[in-house]
Image (cartoon, rainbow, N blue to C red):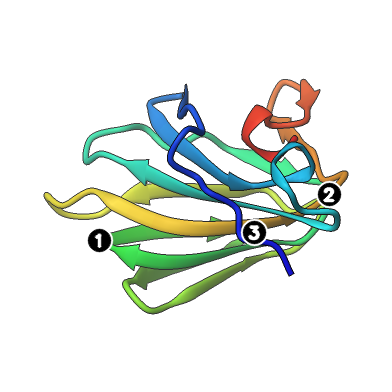
Amino acid sequence: MAVVSTRTNAPHTLHGARFHPLVSPRRGARENSLWRVRIDPGTPGTPHEVTREELLLVTAGQAAVQLGETRATASAGDVIVVPADTRFTLEVVGDAPFEALVCLPVGGQARLADGTTFTPPWAE
């Protein structure tokens, strides 16, 4: 068992969202990365895919979620399951920020609409 302090992990900002890494291969985990994300109201959604299944536990706020052709609304307490290789867009609903804990298996990458593929720095 390991206890990992997250106080010194520097946050990252991308497309208006703020990502705070918790654990990843660089931060004590071997098989999964876990981070917090915060998206403020008015931030445009960024369509993308992930190469591995991603899980988002909504901890605050509400979001309109598009997974492939399916649209849904997610609120605090809901879990968004993003299948691998499925177009995903999330947009904040209302005046409160959207916050979630996000888990992605090690080796998972993000793929933007223009085809750019990268490993998020908060998941390394």
Distance from Cα at disc 3 to Cα at disc 2: 9 Å
Total numbered labels placed on residues in the image: 3
Taking the image as shown, residue 24 lies to the left or right of residue 80, namely right
Q: Residue furthest bottom?
A: 77
The 10 Å Cα crowd at callout 3, few under 14, some 14 to 19, many 20 or more, is many
- For the residue labelled by badge 2, is the local secondary structure a helix, a strand or a loop? loop
Distance from Cα at disc 2 to Cα at disc 1: 27 Å
Query: Which residue does the image show at 79% across and 38% down from the upper left?
Result: 109
Query: Which residue does the image show at 35% across and 44% down from the upper left?
Result: 38
- For the residue labelled by badge 3, is the local secondary structure a helix, a strand or a loop? strand
Mark number, residue 61: 1
Q: Amino acid at mark 2?
A: Val
Distance from Cα at disc 1 to Cα at disc 3: 18 Å
The front one of 44 and 105 is: 105
Figure check: 118 above or below 82:
above
Q: Position of residue 46 (x, y in %)?
A: 51, 34
Query: Which residue does the image show at 58% across and 38% down from the upper left?
Result: 47
Q: Position of residue 49 (x, y in %)?
A: 71, 44
The front one of 59 and 21 is: 21
Q: Amino acid at mark 1?
A: Gly
Q: Which residue is mark 2?
A: 106
Figure check: 95 above or below 2:
above
The front one of 66 and 119 is: 119
Q: Position of residue 75 (x, y in %)?
A: 32, 71
Q: Nearer the viewer, mark 2 or mark 1?
A: 2
